[in-house]
Image (cartoon, rainbow, N blue to C red):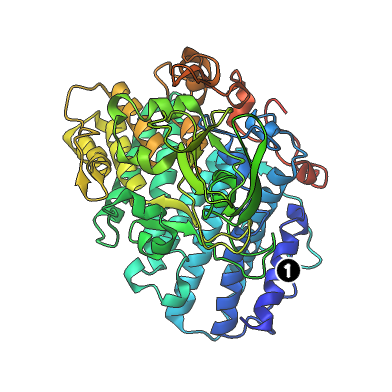
Amino acid sequence: MNRFFYIIIIFLLFLSSCSLKEKEVAILTPQNTLNSQAGVASYINGCYNIFTTGSCFKTGYQPFFLRGDEIYAPSSYGNFSSKADNPQSSQTGSFWGSMYSVIQNANYLIANIQPMKLDSAYKARTVGECYFLRAFCYYYLVRIFGDVPLKLQPTTDGKLVNFPRVSADTIYRQIFNDLSLANATLLPYSKQPFAEFGHATKGAAQAILSSAYLTYGNRLDLLGNTASAKIYYQLAENFADSVINSGQYNLIPNYSNLWDVAQEKNAYKEVIFGIHFMRDAQGSSAGVGSEYADMFMPGNMPNVAGYNVLVNIYNTNGTKKDTSNLPQTGQGYFLVQPWFVKTYTSGDYTNDYRGDCSFLSSWGYQTNQGDSIHVFTYPQSIPTQTSTYWVSSNANTYLQKYVDPYAFDAPNNENDLFIIRLAEVYMIKAEAENEINGPTGVAYSAFNMLRARARNANGVLRTTPANLQTGLTQAQFRMKINDERALELVGEGHRWFDLIRQKSPNGTTMLEYQLSTVIPSFTQGMPVWNGKTKTWGGGLTYLPGVPSFLQRFLLLPIPFNETSTNPAITYQNPGY
């Protein structure tokens, strides 16, 4: 990296903490730094780098994992876990700022690139990449905050402008337009230069466009405009087909390989777009690594993340036997709801390999004195007591999609955040087809692509989950899609977005249905281990993570640091 690149990164990080009206890139002009292809490439890299900062997908995105119903955090994230967000939340504000920083910088390059003496083909796809970045950011903003300011021109020195919120419908129209422009010029994955790995491709534009059309169709459906919704469902299916039929992507045959950090580059045969993190040997929270392994993996399982802990081992009489130093553990801040584990390891999902790969409930380690310790938690039963074992009293089930045994430190793991995979595109096709025509053979076929892969347990074929064939109503198949997405994409940041866009059997959002109808049907409280019967009893719900439904759960508040400095924003989201 050259000195110019570092200047850009420092400046972009500064922008992420500013109000919308304060975002400027006046120091970057075609006359000085953006006068070569190398300079433009560094500038684009700087835009992507914002996604990996603490204010964005590194840690700023963490509260959105907790907005759904499957992930909870019982400790320092309690307010987020109980969905008690407020406009002064620093993480919500920083994510907002990061998105608008990328939008500002994309706008600047779109407005200034034409006079630059660059290769015409490179210039065209660079503009397409800026359109993608702008649309990508607005797609997150509109789903998280609803009506937001729409900014299509760069704010430059001396022209500080306050922007009002515009309707979500207007934002979606801009997203569709920008992604269509990006689709026209971006390269397919197979032709992407090696140096641009992790950047947007034609497939990424088409996949996000397919997702956005589906989401907007859902929006219209929930508002009762079913006829118009079908137009967007058809567009969603069309662009899903474009990705599927492009020949650029395929489902990784072994689901577990998607989560093997040593094979992460190969995962991009299925991953269409992701946030690309790298281990940072400098070892700081400002590094370019991710924190997901640290967030999700337990604190007494070695060689899974970048944290180091001391674990006390006790004899049966209560005296301390050993204090073992466990290297490279996680901290286990985020956990999986017991009801979710129960639901997606039983019924249709009994013996589903995705559950094996996603849920962690037993592991072992060696003490300093050489003893083997086996840890068990819900829903694992203890098969034998031939060695020392410990049953977790808090019954935590962990998510094991993010594991990095080679991390340098806790905030710098290698694990990427997969934004959209081919598996999701198949589900988009199935869902859109169902909303247009009901559960046709086309819809079943797309749906069953995931089931077929799920039966491949590391090369050993299983009989479950079985394919769906016939006999479901449109509403029943919609619920099957919701379930399939829940397990397939657990822990990838999709659940809340699915719950607030999909229509439930009651005609409400799926989030209201889950919090008001489904989850209350489970026994309240956490599972409890019975040492005599060697079984789990008690409840299946961490209650603070699934409070009674409130309308404000459908959107986050506009951040205080925006409303306090931008008088053009005249209203807050409901309930805040």
* Number of marks: 1
Nearest the eye: 188 or 305: 305
Q: Which quadrant would residue 26 be assigned to in this image? A: bottom right
Nearest the eye: 173 or 504: 504
Q: Residues within 10 Å of mark 1 (few under 14, many from 20)?
A: some
Tell me: residue 421, above or below residue 501: below
The image position of residue 80, as x and y in percent, is 66, 34
The image position of residue 335, as x and y in percent, is 55, 36
Q: Which residue is mark 1?
A: 11
Q: Judging from the image, what secondary structure is the residue with disc 1 in?
A: helix
Say whether residue 166 is visible.
no
Who's the residue at 64% across and 54% down the image? 308
The image position of residue 489, as x and y in percent, is 41, 42
Which amino acid type corresponds to the residue marked 1 in the rendered image? Phe
Check the picture and name the quadrant holding the N terminus: bottom right
Nearest the eye: 295 or 545: 295
Who's the residue at 59% across and 61% down the image? 289
Say whether residue 49 is visible.
yes
The image position of residue 221, as x and y in percent, is 42, 28
Q: Is residue 561 left or right of residue 203?
A: right
Who's the residue at 60% across and 81% down the image? 39
Q: Which quadrant would residue 383 be assigned to in this image? A: top left
Check the picture and name the quadrant holding the C terminus: top right
Q: Is residue 405 left or right of residue 351?
A: right
Who's the residue at 52% across and 55% down the image? 303
Q: Which quadrant would residue 288 be assigned to in this image? A: bottom right
